Image (cartoon, helix red, strand yellow):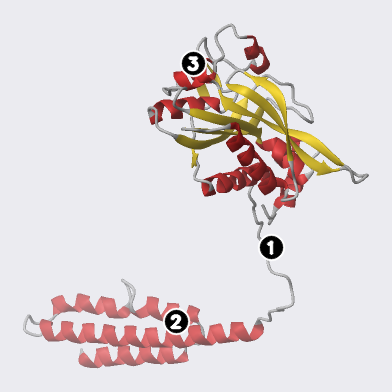
């Protein structure tokens, strides 16, 4: 039996020595090491041996199996390395060819404006506040000094889901919720987010747009504080040379109220102004409903359309570009310096 084992070992090692590729290695493995291979079948001879000889024979078969497996592994490693070297030798890489171009996304221009404004006001100590887009009529209108039959509601006719809930028409309800949450404590917030109104979509209007509102409530807040913030914001967004102009206006939630214009240079070199936002001092009724004593606290508020800023900042001619997901339009804002 020992001679038989030696012959099998010699045949297996010779076959491995002569193997020229990995397929021949696999054939040797199947011939000797598979379940029906020659070495595996040797274990069936144990039942024909005397019980006293079985341990020694089993040990020799296992030793043979280990030696053949090691020889097969060594030969396979050599052939794999040779195949790799041959492949590398035959492959030619032209390093002058362009690589695969990966599409690089960018921040949407409206989000660029929002992040820019947020950075500016956070630097002034403001907090960023958010609230639900499906809002209660009480927060959206009534707490903004717009009673059930107030005529100014007609300017913000919008999408109702039932008699008391609607898609918010401005981010002012976030201010109302924040005032109640502060429980009469001073606050400085901005409220960015989507708003909805019943407008026909055209180059300057959209039924959905984005707004950033600001609210400050504290002791001894004056109109001069509002003008200072508005001037700094305009110069941050449009350039240090810009000036602002305030015109009297009317909003139910502020008194006095103003429209804010920002200066620009006309083609003839003269200075012109274009309207960008509305603002004013917080109405005493709004302070009371928010939990503030108007004799001790004063405040100011402002609201600006994000699309309006982006249109002026990037010279966009149609508000609908922001919502059509046209990559030809959006790709223009890659790497834009905010």
Please state which of residues 319 and 291 is positioned toward the viewer in this rendering: 291
Q: Which residue ends up furthest to the top in the rendered image? A: 149
Marks 2 & 1, CB-CB < 8 Å contact: no
Which residue corresponds to mark 3? Answer: 138
Q: Which residue ends up furthest to the right in the rendered image? A: 268
Q: Secondary structure at mark 1?
A: loop
Residue 75 at what x, y percent from top left?
42, 87
Marks 3 & 2, CB-CB < 8 Å contact: no
Please state which of residues 305 and 326 is positioned toward the viewer in this rendering: 305
Sequence order check, earlier mark of 3 and 2:
2
Which residue corresponds to mark 2? Answer: 25
Residue at 79% x, 31% y is 203
Q: Which mark is residue 101?
A: 1
Residue 247 at what x, y percent from top left?
73, 28
Residue 84 visible in this rendered orientation of the protein:
yes
Residue 194 at what x, y percent from top left?
59, 31
Sequence order check, earlier mark of 1 and 3:
1
Residue 297 position (above or below residue 27): above
- Corner quadrant of residue 300: top right
Count neighbours of disc 3 (C-alpha within 10 A) and say few if under 14, some if 14 to 19, many if 20 or more: some
């Amino acid at each position: 039996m020992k001679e038989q084992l030696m012959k099998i070992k010699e045949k297996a090692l010779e076959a491995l020595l002569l193997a020229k590729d990995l397929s021949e290695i696999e054939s040797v493995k199947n011939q000797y090491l598979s379940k029906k291979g020659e070495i595996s079948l040797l274990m069936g001879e144990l039942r024909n041996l005397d019980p006293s000889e079985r341990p020694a024979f089993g040990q020799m078969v296992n030793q043979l199996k280990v030696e053949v497996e090691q020889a097969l592994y060594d030969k396979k490693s050599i052939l794999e390395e040779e195949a790799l070297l041959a492949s590398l030798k035959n492959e030619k890489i032209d390093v002058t060819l362009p690589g695969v171009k990966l599409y690089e996304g960018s921040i949407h221009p409206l989000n660029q404006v929002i992040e820019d404004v947020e950075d500016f006001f956070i630097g002034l100590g403001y907090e960023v506040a958010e609230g639900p887009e499906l809002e209660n009529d009480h927060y959206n209108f009534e707490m903004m000094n717009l009673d059930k039959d107030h005529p100014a509601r007609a300017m913000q006719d919008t999408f109702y889901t039932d008699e008391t809930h609607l898609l918010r028409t401005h981010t002012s309800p976030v201010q109302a919720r924040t005032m109640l949450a502060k429980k009469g404590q001073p606050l400085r917030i901005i409220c960015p987010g989507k708003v909805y109104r019943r407008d026909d979509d055209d180059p300057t209007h959209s039924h959905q747009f984005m707004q950033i509102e600001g609210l400050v409530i504290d002791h001894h807040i004056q109109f001069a504080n509002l003008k200072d913030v508005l001037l700094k914001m305009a110069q941050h967004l449009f350039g240090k040379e810009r000036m602002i102009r305030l015109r009297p206006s009317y909003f139910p939630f502020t008194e006095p109220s103003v429209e804010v214009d920002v200066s620009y240079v006309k083609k003839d070199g003269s200075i012109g102004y274009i309207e960008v936002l509305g603002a004013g001092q917080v109405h005493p009724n709004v302070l009371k409903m928010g939990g503030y004593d108007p004799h001790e606290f004063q405040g100011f508020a402002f609201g600006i359309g994000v699309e309006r800023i982006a249109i002026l900042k990037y010279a966009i001619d149609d508000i609908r570009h922001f919502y059509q997901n046209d990559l030809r339009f959006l790709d223009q804002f890659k790497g834009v310096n905010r």
